[in-house]
Amino acid sequence: MDSTMISAYRALNEAQAAISRANTLDEALQDGLRIILANCDAEFGVIWYADPKGDGALHPFFWVGKYDLTSRCHRKGQGVVGRAFESQEAERYLDFRPEDDPETVEDFQGIDVTSMVCVPFSTKSDNLGCIQFVNKLGGGRLTDEEADVCEMVAMLASLALDDNLDLSPAW
């Protein structure tokens, strides 16, 4: 078994354990995101939630990293987060170039983005939002293997949330 799969299994087990021990949805998502980031070498990560009762945009629910994302949002279909949410398919930019995606550049004003992975976050009954991983910790770009870990663990974390029935309806 290669190191990528070992990392993915370790992250998955840790995230599932954290989610199953959580008493609140906030706790489950925060602990799960921290575990995923620690295992995929991303500089920062964001859980974007879809606000169906408000403006319909994706807002930062929780993030780990040095940037304050409080005032940021993504519209469905716009930028990498909005497109991943609308299509319900992961998007990868392992060599992000601003000229390739002006909408995403606008979303990240003031943040130097070199690579990113954005994975839809859903339960059995709802499309909740997206989990986004940005840049490689310590500089450089995320590799295909690290992006694989991000995608696998984020998707499987959704399943773990479904399994903790006390938390999933609260979203």
Image (cartoon, rainbow, N blue to C red):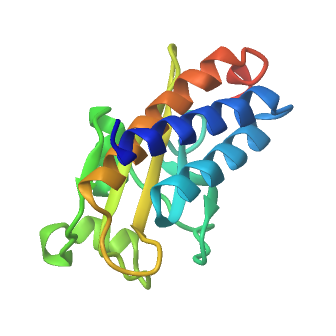
Q: Quadrant of the C terminus?
A: top right
Residue 78 is situated, as x and y percent measured from the top left of the image, at 29, 53
Tell me what residue is drawn at x 67 percent, y 42 percent: 29
User: How many numbered circles are shown?
Assistant: 0
Residue nearest the viewer, comparing 136 with 81:
136
Residue at image coords 52%, 49%: 48
Q: Quadrant of the N terminus?
A: top left
Query: Quick check: 50 left or right of 80?
Result: right
Q: Quick check: 22 left or right of 79? A: right
The quadrant in which residue 142 appears is: bottom left
Q: Report which quarter residue 79 is drawn in.
A: bottom left
**The residue positioned farthest toward the front in the image shown:** 1
Find residue 87 and report its horizontal and vertical position in percent: 26, 34
On the question of residue 76 being in view, the answer is no
> Residue at 81% across / 30% down in the picture?
21
Q: Quadrant of residue 49?
A: top right
Q: Is residue 149 above or below residue 160?
A: below
* Along the line of sight, the residue nearer the viewer: 99 or 39: 39
Residue furthest toward the left? Answer: 100
Q: Give the left or right position of residue 141, taking residue 107 as reference.
A: left
Q: Residue at x 55, y 32 (%)?
A: 157
Q: Nearer the viewer, residue 7 or 42?
A: 7
Note whether residue 58 is visible.
yes
